[in-house]
Image: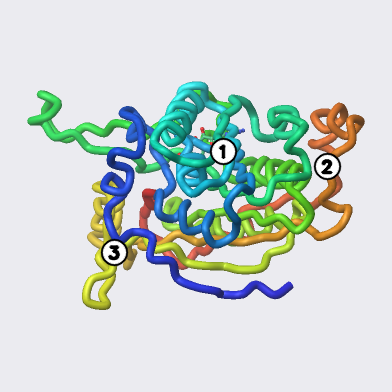
Amino acid sequence: MTVRLASVWNTAPTSAPAQRKDRYVPGSAAHPAKMLPILAAHAILAYTHAGETVLDPMCGIGTTLVEAIHHGRNALGVEYEPKWAHLARRNADSAMLDGGNGHGSVACGDARDLPALIPAEHHGKIAFVLTSPPYGPSDHGQVRSSRDSGQPGVTKRNFRYSHDPHNLAHIPTDALLDAFTDILTQCRRVLRPGGTVVVTTRPWRERGELIDLPSAALAAGEAAGLVPTERNVALLAGIRDSQLIPRPSFFQMKNVRDARRQGTPLHLIAHEDVIVLKAPPGPGSSPPSKHAHRTHARTRRCASRKPVTTAVFRSRSCTGGGDRADR
Ligand SMILES: C[S@@+](CC[C@H](N)C(=O)[O-])C[C@H]1O[C@@H](n2cnc3c(N)ncnc32)[C@H](O)[C@@H]1O
């Protein structure tokens, strides 16, 4: 396997709210872990042509769809939570009304059942998948001061995906990786031969251990029958006078400061890993048969592939009480 360390993407020249301003419907900010719009646009422009179809199987508020539509690509989204799926639909509609040349549609459901959620006419024809897996209890979210809330101290809001225990954000990391492998396997089935998959993700810390989710996502892609080809860096920091200008959230900053106070030399995470994989060029990526559709749900738990576990992606180099890095 040759994974090219290809390039660094300048994806945060402005802050996330500035990137979304006047492009996303009110309420979109409530999602705890959105992709940077410039990151989505960069990936779509780099790996697709106008008129092609892009899919995000875990589309949140629909960043992939909005950016695809504005750049003349058609977009399909799947999202488990009805409230985010509703927002993704509204964002896609707004992009179409706003002059975007592409078309977008969103289905609400579990992406492990992807072929059943995507119209059959698209099976085997999707050029590109762009997605970002969720991860669990975190320091996502925004802060309200006592002046805003009328309550003493700072309060945290918009830090949850939902209260549904079946949302993949709320299950143990090993199970999340197994489910993510299932989702990528389904993506391979609806992709056209040779189609591209881009997964953006970042590591986090759990009781001082670094969980290398990007490497785990790469392993999940391989277990799903995809071929890793590139590993890029998408900046979450701006660049000024050749220096990185970090744009940390309140909680990311707080966790790093707390860890340092306790003697753990943590650094702010200032980039997201961008893993690029390819569907095989031949029959391996052809659409599933009707029989495969019917039996998928029953058999997916019995698949012979080796599960991807976090055991190999844990680093014990940090011993302090670090917490998850924010998105
Ligand atoms: C990291 S967020 C994606 C955010 C998205 N890229 C955006 O910019 O809005 C991951 C999303 O996966 C959704 N999700 C969790 N489990 C899922 C499943 N089984 N099928 C589909 N979506 C799921 C979560 O609700 C969450 O919105």
- Residue marked by disc 1: 58
Looking at the rendered structure, the kind of residue marked 2 is: Pro
52 horizontally vs 250: left or right = right
Quadrant holding the N terminus? bottom right
- Residue marked by disc 2: 287
State how far apart marks 3 and 2 are (Cα): 41 Å
In-front residue for pair 271/151: 271
Label 1 near ligand 1 (CB < 8 Å): yes
Residue 32 to residue 211: above or below: above
* Residue 141 location (% of width, % of height): 32, 38
Location of residue 318 (image quadrant) = bottom left
* Residue 254 location (% of width, % of height): 25, 51
Q: Disc 2 or 1, which lies upstream in sequence?
A: 1
* Residue at 49% over, 35% down: 60
- Residue marked by disc 3: 238
56 horizontally vs 206: left or right = right
Looking at the rendered structure, the kind of residue marked 3 is: Gly
State how far apart marks 1 and 3 are (Cα): 27 Å
Looking at the rendered structure, the kind of residue marked 1 is: Met
Residue 117 to residue 270: above or below: above
In this orientation, does residue 163 appear?
Answer: no
* Residue at 53% over, 54% down: 44
How busy is the neighbourhood of tag 1: few (under 14 within 10 Å), some, or many (20 plus)?
A: many
Is there CB contact under 8 Å for labels 2 and 1?
A: no
Q: Disc 3 or 2, which lies upstream in sequence?
A: 3
168 horizontally vs 20: left or right = right
Q: Which is closer to the viewer, label 3 or label 2?
A: 2
* Residue at 42% over, 38% down: 99
